[in-house]
Image (tube, grey):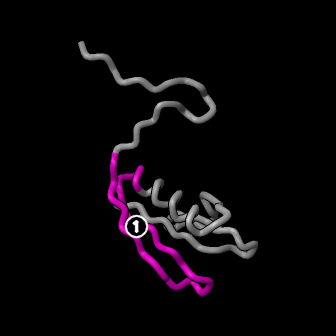
Amino acid sequence: MTAKRYVKQNASGSWDVLKEGHRRSAIRAPSKQKAVARASHLVQSEGGGHVQVMNEMGKVMDTRKITGRTVKATKRAGSGSTLRKSKRR
C-alpha cells in the first residue's frame, strides 16, 4: 500500500502535513520546503508513496513520488533505550 501525504499552507502562514483521509495535521513546519522534506521522510519510512503540495484553493500544484527504504532506528524518542538486532544462534 502506498502512503500519501498532503502539504498545504494554513491560515497562520505555516505549512501543515496531512495524512490522506485525516483533517488534523500530523506535522506543522515554518516553511514549505521543511514541510515537504518531513512529509517525504514519513512516506519513505512507510515504504514509499506520494507527497502532494496543495495551493490555497485545494488544487494539487506539485506531486512527488517517493520510493521506500528501510529506516534504521537507533533510539526510541524519549526512552533512551537502544534498539538492537537479534543475535544469531
Q: Position of residue 14 (x, y in %)?
A: 69, 68
Residue at horizontal 33%, vertical 54%?
A: 68
Residue at horizontal 51%, vertical 75%?
A: 53
Query: How many numbered marks, from 0 up?
Result: 1
Give the residue number, with chain letter if any, for mark 1: 50
Outermost residue, right direction?
12
Q: Is residue 6 left or right of residue 72?
A: right
Q: Is residue 40 left or right of residue 28?
A: left
For badge 1, the amino acid type reads His
Magenta span of residues: 44-69
User: Quadrant of the image for the C terminus?
Assistant: top left
Q: Is residue 49 above or below residue 12?
A: above
Q: Is residue 36 above or below residue 61?
A: above
On whether residue 56 falls in the magenta region, the answer is yes
Q: Depth check: 68 or 22 in front?
A: 68
Crowding at label 1, few (<14), some or many (≥20) Cα neighbours within 10 Å?
some
Q: Is residue 38 above or below residue 87?
A: below
Q: Position of residue 8 (x, y in %)?
A: 59, 73
Residue at horizontal 63%, vertical 64%?
A: 24
Outermost residue, top direction?
89
Q: Position of residue 75 (x, y in %)?
A: 52, 31
The quarter of the picture where residue 4 lies is bottom left
Q: Is residue 10 left or right of residue 17?
A: right
User: Quadrant of the image for the N terminus?
Assistant: bottom left
Q: Is residue 26 left or right of residue 40?
A: right
Q: Position of residue 66 (x, y in %)?
A: 37, 62
Q: Secondary structure at mark 1?
A: strand
On whether residue 32 falls in the magenta region, the answer is no
